[in-house]
Image: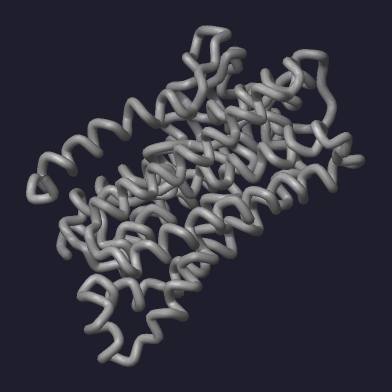
Amino acid sequence: MKRTPICFTVFTVALVVLFIGDILLGSVGLAAHEVWAALFGRATGGPEAELARSLVWEFRLPKAVVAVAAGAALSASGLQMQTLFRNPLAGPYVLGVSSGASLGVSLFLLGLPLLGASATTEAVRNLGTVGSAWIGAAVILFVVMAVSARIKDIMAVLILGMMFGSAATAFVDILQFLSPEGAVKSFVVWTMGSLGGVSAAQLKWLLPAVAIGLLLSVWLIKPLNLLLLGENYARTMGLNVRRVRGIIMISTILLAGSVTAFCGPIGFIGIAVPHIARMLLGDADHRVLMPASIVLGGAVMLACDIISQMPGSNTVLPINTISALLGIPVVAIVVIRNRKFF
């Protein structure tokens, strides 16, 4: 517990510094004073000032906010799933929840046009996108939870979750094969993950959904601590396990489903960040682990976004490539440290 205040201070400082850095850095070079003037300066200015103001307010600031929200959401949902399934490799990406959300989005964006229907307005498109992602994530998560209630082997549940995710991906591939080339190209770019494509209208859906999901995650701290000791012990302590599982399901759907809907399926953050927080804190108590994972998740996602922009270059890499490169070593360490699974 002695290291907890130090870790929280480091995580918070890293979050603030990386948030500022994400606004300052980008494929288009802006000096620090230009960014400051765009954020807090007067409304008047020349063409260069207008360009800086447009870049900061319409692109960089929303993208940094999305990065924090996405990182916090995926980390919180990953921690919940690791505790619920008692599996250190559980997460929305590995267990197929993100794939289910992707299937829902693909059915809405690619399936409806094949049937001759489409969203008529941006509001309907946004609602349909996030709603279909929630439904897709809910279906996969419900199936995995039903299987885990009958099969206690954590590796078997993990493998089945990956199979369900692969099945969802297969249906997505079929829809891509049947869809027009233009629709497929934009959808493939979406599957690579992007933080900069979230519009102001989409933020109105993303941020409230993530906020509600995170509030549920914080409310679940005590039940999650009881579940760490086993469901039977939790029941003897008066915990309504079925009710808690349902709330975890709702929280995970809101967190992972909403992020996937607007940012694409971002992998490894949900698995890696809770483990990084756990190793640095040296504590499995969710009273410190949950808020630490939320803050650290936002910081890690900001770092991924900064790296993906390749400052000094006009190239922006897909966010999924960076999160995978950062997350895979952590997953490898977890597997090696838990050799008993094999």
Residue depicted at x 64% and y 40%? 262
Which colouring convention does the figure follow? one colour
Quadrant location, the C terminus: top left
Residue 233 screen position, x and y as percent: 22, 84
* Relative to 311, 122 lies left or right: right
**Residue drawn at x 43%, y 56% as measured from the top left:** 77
Q: Residue at x 80, y 32 (%)?
A: 114
Figure check: 322 above or below 9: above
Tell how many labels: 0
- Residue lying at the far top of the rendered structure: 313
Front in this rendered view, residue 299 or 219: 219
Residue at position x 50%, y 69% from top?
Answer: 216
Q: Choose between 90 and 34: the one closer to the eye.
A: 90
Would residue 12 be visible to someone looking at this image?
A: no
- Quadrant of res 40: top right
Closer to us: 341 or 208: 341
Quarter-wise, where is residue 173 in the image? top right
Q: Quadrant of residue 47?
A: top right
**Residue 118: x and y, percent?**
86, 38
